[in-house]
Structures are given as C-alpha cells and as structure tokens.
C-alpha cells in the first residue's frame, strides 16, 4: 500500500508526475505548453509551494491562483480532464487522509475556477485581482 502525502518530497513527486501527464496530454498539453512555454521549472516550483501550503500547512505560497487562469481558453471538458489526471496521479502514488484531501481540494478548485471563468466571460469583464 502506498504511503500518504506527508513531506515536501511527496509534493514534488505529485506535482512532477501530474504535470508530466498534463504536458503530454492531447487536450491540455497544447494549452499549458503554449502558455508556460520554457518556464516549466518556474511553474513547477510555484506549484510545489502552492500544494505545500495547502496540504502540509507550511505557508510558502504567496499569490492569487485564479488570475493567471482567468483568460485561458478552457471549458468544462478541460477542467474534467485536469481533474481526472490529478486524481489518477494521486491514486498512483499515495493513499491516506492527505491524498483524499488533495483530490477534494483539486475538485473544489476546478469547480471554482470554472465558475469564475464562465462568470467573467458572460459579463465580458476583467477578473478582480
């Protein structure tokens, strides 16, 4: 049985494994690779600190996660695929309370981002930063 998410090395494994899948995914890869381009190391480091803050309660992430995503050309199908890959990655590597929490938080984040993006598109407004 796999161990739970408990240390920074676990966060790095989760993030690296997940984004390896995203980068090569037919649906998500072109979007992420197009936006991030050659800045993957910087993006991965930011994701390490985000999930470290969320799951390990070690506050290392500073910023607002929504604004960089607000203008992405994404719809429900993209969020569904993102969540599928994320949960699949968690299940491949981890088992336990934090693994369950990671999937729950990812689900909630995907729902929130999708609703906010749809709202701003329908209002033709700029997101509040």
Image: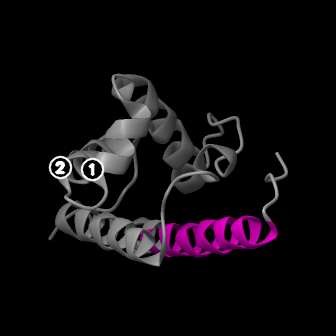
Q: Identify the element where label 1 is drawn.
A: helix
Q: Quadrant of residue 98?
A: bottom left
Task: Judge whether 10 appears above or below 119 on screen.
Answer: above
Residue at (61, 51) in percent of width and height: 71
Residue 100 picture location, percent across and down: 42, 75
**Which numbered tag is attached to residue 122?**
none
Q: Is residue 88 left or right of residue 125?
A: left
State which region is magenta.
103-123
Q: Do the residues under discs 2 and 1 have CB atoms within 8 angstroms?
A: yes
Q: Distance between the residues labelled 2 and 1?
A: 5 Å
Query: Tag count in the figure?
Result: 2
Q: Mark 2 — residue?
A: 24
Residue 68 picture location, percent across and down: 61, 43
Residue placed most toward the observer, 25 or 8: 25
Residue 96 picture location, percent across and down: 35, 72
Q: In this view, does 69 lie to the left or right of 86?
A: right
Q: Is residue 70 left or right of residue 21?
A: right
Q: Residues within 10 Å of mark 1 (few under 14, many from 20)?
A: some
Q: Which of marks 2 and 1 is nearer the N terminus?
A: 2
Magenta-drawn stretch, dominant element (helix, strand or loop): helix
């Amino acid at each position: 049985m796999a161990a739970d998410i408990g240390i920074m090395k676990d966060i790095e494994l989760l993030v690296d494994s997940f984004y390896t899948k995203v980068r090569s995914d037919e649906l998500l890869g072109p979007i992420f690779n197009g936006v991030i381009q050659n800045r993957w190391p910087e993006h991965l480091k930011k994701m390490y600190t985000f999930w470290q803050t969320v799951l390990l309660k070690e506050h290392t992430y500073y910023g607002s996660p929504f604004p960089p995503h607000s203008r992405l050309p994404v719809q429900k199908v993209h969020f569904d695929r993102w969540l599928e890959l994320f949960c699949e990655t968690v299940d491949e590597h981890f088992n336990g309370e934090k693994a369950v929490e990671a999937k729950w938080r990812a689900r909630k984040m995907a729902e929130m981002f999708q609703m906010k993006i749809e709202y701003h598109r329908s209002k033709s407004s700029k997101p509040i930063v």
